[in-house]
Image (cartoon, rainbow, N blue to C red):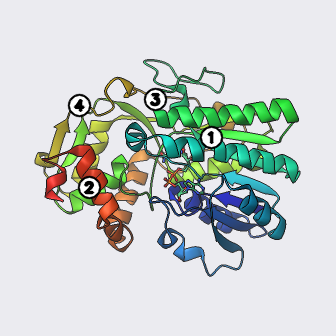
Amino acid sequence: MNLLVTGGAGFIGSNYCRHVLQHHPEDSISVLDALTYAGSLSTIRDMETDPRFRFHQGRIEDPKIVDRIIQEDKIDAIVNFAAETHNDRSLIDAGDFLTSNVIGVHVLLVATRRHKLQRMLHVSTDEVYGSISSGEFTEESPLMPNTPYSASKAAGDLQCRAHFVSFGTPVIVTRGGNTYGPYQYPEKLISFFCARLMDNKKVPVYGEGSQVREWIHVMDHASGIDTALRMGSPGQVYNVGDSNERRNMEVVEILLDELGKSRELIKHIPDPREGAHDTRYSMSADKLQGLGWKPSKTFEESLRDTVRWYVDNERWWRPITQRLEYQTFVKSFYGPGLGEDL
Ligand SMILES: NC(=O)c1ccc[n+]([C@@H]2O[C@H](COP(=O)([O-])OP(=O)(O)OC[C@H]3O[C@@H](n4cnc5c(N)ncnc54)[C@H](O)[C@@H]3O)[C@@H](O)[C@H]2O)c1
């Protein structure tokens, strides 16, 4: 298959490209990425000499570039990772979230239909379900998003459903858990904390850090998306989860231990998400497992490997943390006491 991978210069998209190049020698990949603050050519440098890999800079909500790539690169299927993805940034200004995560999905759905593509796979998140105090979400659970980010993702999911029902567009949605691993922009818990702890800087824990998240390693998330793309049925939703539920504080303690750092580097701060901070995410991935997918390693093993990757790949993340945009965001969001020591 010739795949158009949107958002392929970001965290999960780039790792998905690595998965495809390794496991499907007959496939080719065309990446379309806007290179927002979260995307970078340094994230895909290892693939750029592969003749099966091409890069195009542009936005998914621009139908002209989407159409041109589909025609010129003879695309069979779209896998859409392109999105604004940081919950905390959506609390400051959600405008770009609506453009990329809603209008962008609409443009890709129209292109899938117009060009009669075999498939579109839209990558979504477990956050569209909202918070659950006990039990687990299934694909049939109602969508109850609680932040502007998760609401924009839910709107994208609903566009997919509507295009399948109205036009028979062959679209599949996956909803993944909290993802960690190599090449994650250092603003999400694990990558952000690794980068700060390596510099002996304090790390901000929201409240008591008792929020429970379901964690999945990025290569398991990538293989789950690929299984849904190739084995799933159009119109269906598949949860991609690994049942690794951990309190945020448990994760922070593992990071401190792995990096040999003191508990004194933890700074508890008032929760900036206030009422919108979901206390627990949990979902069943039985439906995807029914297609033959299963995660590869334990959480502890994969987390250790991830910490090692950030230690060994400072060359990748250091230039990001030195950018003015990055430093301004951290300072303005977390305020004095945390930001001032940057
Ligand atoms: N990170 C997670 O924990 C997680 C969990 C579940 C689902 N997801 C979903 O997976 C997808 C990828 O997430 P990620 O963590 O890799 O994000 P990321 O922020 O690392 O990467 C997003 C990429 O999309 C690009 N992009 C943004 N807007 C664009 C646009 N309008 N047109 C073209 N490119 C654009 C960026 O330049 C960047 O390269 C997102 O849809 C996200 O909602 C993420």
Q: Is residue 50 left or right of residue 340?
A: right
Check contact, mark 1 vs mark 3: CB within 8 A.
no
Which of label 1 and label 2 is nearer to you? 1
Reading the image, the residue beneath label 4 is: 207
The C terminus, quarter of image = bottom left
Q: Name which of mark 4 and mark 2 comes first in the sequence.
A: 4
> Around disc 1, counting alpha carbons within 10 Å, would you say few (fewer than 14), some (14 to 19), or many (20 or more)?
many
Q: CA distance from mark 1 to mark 2?
A: 39 Å
Check contact, mark 2 vs mark 3: CB within 8 A.
no
Above or below — where is 233 with respect to 140?
Answer: below
Residue 42, horizontal then vertical, whole percent: 48, 72
Label 2 beta carbon within 8 A of ligand 1: no
Dot 4: element: loop
Which numbered circle lies on residue 102?
1
Amino acid tagged 2: Glu
Amino acid tagged 3: Tyr
Instruction: Work out whether residue 289 can be spotted.
Output: no
Amino acid tagged 4: Gly
Q: CA distance from mark 1 to mark 4?
A: 31 Å
Dot 2: element: helix
Which numbered circle lies on residue 281?
3
Reading the image, the residue beneath label 2 is: 258
- Residue at point 53% right, 31% down? 151
Above or below — where is 103 with respect to 79?
Answer: above
